Amino acid sequence: MIRVASLDDLDAIMTLERLSFRADAWSEATMRADLASPHTWYVVAEEDERLIGYAGLRAPAGSKDADIQTIALDETARGRGLGRELFRTLLAEAARRRVREVFLDVRADNRPAQSLYSSEGFEAIGRRANYYPGEGVDAIVMKLDLTRWAAAEPSPKSDDRAIVGRSATDSPTTAAISDEAAEPAAGENPGGAA
């Protein structure tokens, strides 16, 4: 089940954040601020009353562009399409907010995430050299024409998902997805998409 995140989810999100991003994990204070910000919107995925994934969107009111902040999945939840479902949930919220373009950073060495993003219509528009300095890994900047994506995407049934709400802050604009399985979905580095 996917639902809107709240500050009550902070401990579970931080556990998954640290497992997914290790040394590059956001601090608890940064994540708390992001969850509380009116400029961001986070969702969590639960299974058997356990948080197995989360994702965040930064889309300030009235802005025509947005950023995917992060996506992370527990390794037991990877390869089942949940990463794509979380990702599409963020894009649908951005469309609801009348955003025109969505941006993200993805690790140059994360081919599964790049493949997921490309399959949803994102295009590479630039590169940030040594964006992950401890590892010397570049970030690829990607952009989606959300109007085109929304026009091609079938409207979800209102009873298909339980999502509506806000959360998170003006923290780093990032997206982090990594999945060793066929379907990417767990974070690699919130400092810039995986």
Image (tube, grey):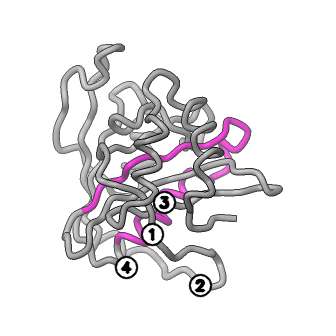
Q: Which residue position is annotated with label 2?
A: 157
For label 3, count other residues whose C-alpha is less than 10 Å away and answer few (under 14), some (14-19) or many (20+): many
Q: CA distance from mark 3 to mark 4?
A: 14 Å
* Side of 83 relative to 92 (left or right): right
Residue at 19% across, 23% down: 129
Mark in front: 2 vs 3: 3
Name the secondary structure under disc 1.
Answer: loop
Instruction: Indicate which disc, 2 or 3, sits on the residue closer to the N terminus.
Output: 3
Disc 1 marks which residue? 166
Q: Residue type at mark 2: give it.
A: Lys
Q: Return the residue at label 4.
A: 96
**Residue occupying the point 70% across, 65% down:** 1
The spot of residue 56 in percent (x, y) is: 44, 55
Q: Which mark is residue 155?
A: none
Magenta part of the chain: 66-94
Q: Position of residue 167 (x, y in %)?
A: 45, 63
Going from N to C along the chain, the mark reached first, 3 or 4, is 3
